[in-house]
Image: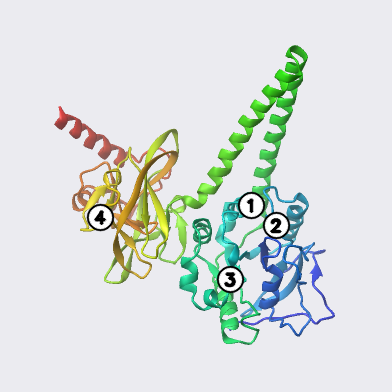
Amino acid sequence: MLKWLWKSPSDKERPLTTEINSPVILLVGKTGAGKSTLGNHLLRISEDKTFVFEVSENKFESCTNQSSYAVYKIGNKEYNIIDTPGVFDTDRPNEEIMTEIARTVQKCAHGIKAILFVLEAKRLTDEQINVINGIITFFGEKAFLYMITVFSFCDKKETTNTKNFEMSWNDKVRMLVNRMGNRWAISPNSDIFPPGQQIHKECLKNLENIIYNLNGIYTNELLEETRKKQEELARIAREKQEKRQREYDEIKRKEGKAIAEAEYSKKKAEDDEIVRIENEKQLKILENKLVKLETGRIIRMSELQVGDRVLSNIRNGIEEFSDVYLIAHIGKLDYEEKFTKISFTKPNGYKDQLRLTTTHSHYVFIENLSIMFAKDLHPGKTKILVSDGNNKLVPVIVDDITNEWHDEYISFYTRAGSVIAEGVLSSCYDDCPPSQSLMYLVFLPVRWWTFFKPSTHRESRLHPYVQFLETAYFSFINLFVQ
């Protein structure tokens, strides 16, 4: 049973001056996104009562200047809801706001149970790229394990027909939600569904259930780890700036101001480009291939561990999960490798992509359940098998095939020999004859061995057994060609 507590109107929101003695539910988001309103909803504060968290009438002006908290219960477990100042409003978040939120987290002695990222439903635009980058930069990658997207200002149709609302998301928002383990909820719009109405209650109950079922805690140590990385990046940036200035002064003294300014601008542009590339790499965290675990979590392939049970097939309306028994390769290479990017349109109309290596040629399943090299798919003609979201694999036409270059990838094997990545039914096998049955037999020794002794291989060096098979296969091909 879900329970809650609120303070009397005379006991306003408490500024954070002491340590918080219960796990925290942290409200974060842009100014005007509806964080304070959500906090009041969770505390069951109706409009005829004094709000615990002050709400601004102007959504572009923040009413929350300092973090404040209120006591809250879900079941028998006590939490503290903390409302934070609006963040991620510009490309360069205000340092004072970030310091305030860092101070808030440091006072959470029992850690953070959930980070509710409040996002206005009517602002599903490309500006969310900056929001995503802000989340990654400030909280760190691991925070995604404890985050929930909460959409605010939803209209009647979006609130009552969540499936259609989900289909309306743009690519970046969809990747953000997927990166949070597909955890999302709706903050009820009191103008449409006042407190006390059934839909208002259901929205809040759904969010509370998601919070309650989260595993683990986001700790001060995780934030400190991220802050140290930020400080190191800031140190590097300062050193580059100082170096540019020294070079400018030297060139100015020897060759004049005009040449010095031109050289300074050139160096600065080069350094800015490096930063831009690094930021893009951060955003690609959200673009990595996603898989579904038997627990319901959606994670990146790079997070997979031996023993995880991943979605490997769908038959007769039933999802089939299979153990990961071997991670043959994971991590960076000393060079960039060619990838095939398969673009396709899902049954719900959402456009998606899947990236597979071409050097280590991967197979995907096509319409007749046979397998084909990803690089050999024909746009506008070949049909691959894609999950429709309703426990059914349906054939969809490949829209486009392009090539990209990346310096890292993961190669792993499930006992079923297949995996559904980004909704696409794919083979775990590469650089081999186009036969799932044959490869199932070829991998029988290592599959059998790992039943008794689980594999601990998790490195960029290819697993010895896989390396042996790959070498043997290419030697046979070369001999056949000769």
Q: Does the rendering let one see residue 192?
A: yes
Which callout, 2 or 4, points at the residue further toward the start of the chain?
A: 2
Say which residue label 1 marks.
134
Q: Secondary structure at mark 3?
A: helix
- Measuring 85% from the left and 80% from the top, which residue is drawn there? 10
Q: CA distance from mark 4 to mark 3?
A: 39 Å
Q: Position of residue 145 (x, y in %)?
A: 55, 60
Amino acid tagged 4: Ile
Say which residue label 4 marks.
366
The nearer-to-camera label among 3 and 2 is 2
Say which residue label 3 marks.
211
- Measuring 54% from the left and 48% from the top, which residue is drawn there? 283
Residue 466's label in the rendered image is none
**In screen coordinates, is 244 left or right of 471?**
right
CB contact under 8 Å: marks 2 and 4 = no
| Most foreground residue, 56 or 206 | 56
Say which residue label 2 marks.
87
Which callout, 3 or 1, points at the residue further toward the start of the chain?
A: 1
Q: Position of residue 137 (x, y in %)?
A: 63, 49
